[in-house]
Amino acid sequence: MDVLSDVITVLRSGETRSARLEFHAPWGQWFAPFPGSAGFQMILQGPCWLLRDVAGAEPLALGAGDIVFRPHGGAHALVDSPSTPHIEPACDPGEARRLQRYANETIGSNGHSVTVTLCGAYQFDPASGHPLLDSLPEVVHLPAHLGRNPGLRSTVDLLATELAQPRLGTDAIVPALVDTLLLYVLRTWFDAQPVSTEATGWAAALTDPGTAAALRAIHGDPAHPWTVASLAAEAGMSRAPFARRFAALLGQPPLTYLTWWRMTTAARLLRESDRPLNAVAARVGYGSEFAFSAAFKRRYGVAPGRFRRS
């Protein structure tokens, strides 16, 4: 089981949204906050600056090929110069119809300096925020030299083409490309993190052989009656060192993460399928519907049936 892909698949909800925007200087545009989402900006042509709605945050200079990922949906602005006032939203993820599937817009018409960007947003289930995303900084900046791996570059080029020239099949192609882009951005970010025996967090956990093996086992079969000892065996380690290593990297014991992942998986099944509660319970490792309902209510504050109806 590919843990990164599994996390994104389970947490994603709603439709991806994306747009190709062409700005003619002078320009400045505000991108509204969108809680429960993550967003990206990709600079295809020309320079610009990123301004964050955070006290003391310095403007970030961006150039062609740069990618900015906002994993927590924070507000920000893109401007041709830090001195240019930003005005009304150009790419507000909250306006579903404006960015439904795809958009292609030109802003301004008199300036000779042109900047072209791709922007987009992913909607996540706010009740199931994964610590993998929580561990990322407010701004993930991938400079052009980091973003030039072939897969990422090809995905950007394909997405830009589909948004600039929609054709038959674009409605299906764009969401798939935006999902692919998210995985490439995260992979590139994690690959760029320094390797250290002292490092903690998900970047370290996914490259630590023992912890990664245990995570693959949990994600591959959440219904299995895992114990710390059996997960340690998957990791090729003895019980106590494994438990310490897992908790040090991920900030929680192995069985705490197992229970959390089971409940997250159950929530997705309740939301997206019509399986009866006993089948959902069995899928995530509970032998009785009563035990499952009690565990689910501890996590979400409501019984599974009520969660599904809401």
Image: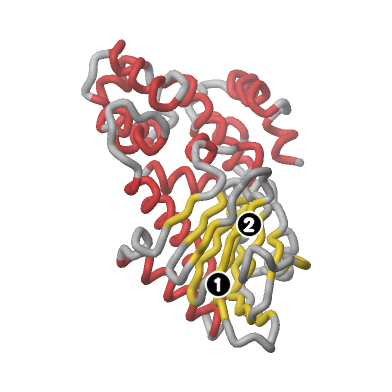
Q: Quadrant of residue 126?
A: top right
Q: In this view, does 244 lie to the left or right of 80?
A: left
Q: Nearer the viewer, residue 201 or 10?
A: 201
**Residue position for label 1:** 117
Q: Which of marks 2 and 1 is nearer the N terminus?
A: 2
Label annotation for residue 15: none
Which residue does the image show at 51% across and 58% down from the upper left? 68
* Residue type pointed to by label 2: Leu
Q: Is residue 193 left or right of residue 260?
A: left
* Residue type pointed to by label 1: Thr
Q: Residue furthest left?
A: 236
Q: Which of 119 and 55 is in front in this view?
A: 55
User: Which quarter of the figure is the C terminus placed in?
Assistant: top right
- 46 shown above or below 135: below
**Total marks in image:** 2
Q: What element carries label 2?
A: strand
Which residue does the image show at 58% across and 38% down from the upper left? 129
Picture coordinates of residue 1, whole percent (x, y): 35, 42
Which residue does the image show at 43% across and 69% down from the upper left? 65
**Residue position for label 2:** 51
Distance (Cα) linking label 2 and label 1: 15 Å
